[in-house]
Image (spheres, rainbow, N blue to C red):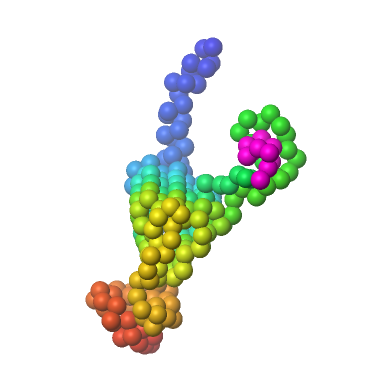
Amino acid sequence: MIFDVIKFILSPFYRHFCRVNEFIKLKRKFPSLKLKGICNIYQSQFGKNVCLYNCDISNCKIDDFSYIAKSSILNNTQVGKFCSIGPNVKSGMGMHPINWISTHPIFYSTNNLTGKINNNKNYFKEYEKIKIGNDVWIGADVIIMDGVTIGDGSIIGAGSIVTKNIPDYSIAVGSPAKVKKMRFENDKIELLKATKWWDYPFKKIESHHIQFKDIRNIEKLKVNLERV
């Protein structure tokens, strides 16, 4: 009884120590990573100048200049460069079998929460990799189901539930999310896809940043970026 009381009293200090220790290790491994507030991070990789705000990240890879806003939970998700992930976004929360007698993980998972049945293997694939392309904007309160790919340059409207793949440079909204329109005409989209501006060194992108403000500049931008 006394031991339990001492453990209860000391646990907040221990958790704080663990957070500080984890923060130090992350900053050593990813010096340009920006952490705001309390972030829970597990087995993830980060590119340059990634920003995280009060979010949970596990088994993810988040590439250069992308940010994740507060209260978002990302699991088993690959995020491209220059992505804007809004608050309270959820991805990779796992799946349950819908055609079995029961949907409860006690019957199929080695990691079931109750632990009353010891499965010697996983009988159902709970998680599938999610891929979010480059320059994607995902609005607040979006849910992304396992196995989904969201194409480069896409926009997902707030509150949407993404259950299927979303093509490049489209705008998708709703539950389930459906493509409402393409952001640009086909010729402009093809030029954007061919340019892949996000893969160029940042100094080169920065030197031509004015051209990013109008889609009519895409041909000129492509030429300038390709110029040695």
Residue 2 drawn at (x, y percent): 52, 12
Q: What is the magenta range?
A: 99-108
**Residue at 73%, 34% in the rendered image:** 118
For residue 162: magenta? no
**Residue at 47%, 64% in the rendered image:** 166
What main secondary structure does the magenta stretch of the protein show? loop
Res. 174 in view: yes
**Residue at 26%, 76% in the rendered image:** 214
Q: Residue furthest top?
A: 1
Res. 51 in view: no
- Tell which of 92 and 36 is nearer to you: 92
Q: Left of 120 or right of it: where is 35?
A: left
- Tell which of 53 and 185 is nearer to you: 185
Residue 27 drawn at (x, y percent): 42, 52
**Residue at 73%, 43% in the rendered image:** 121
- Rendered view: 196 above or below 42: below
Q: Left of 126 or right of it: where is 149?
A: left
Residue 144 drawn at (x, y percent): 47, 53
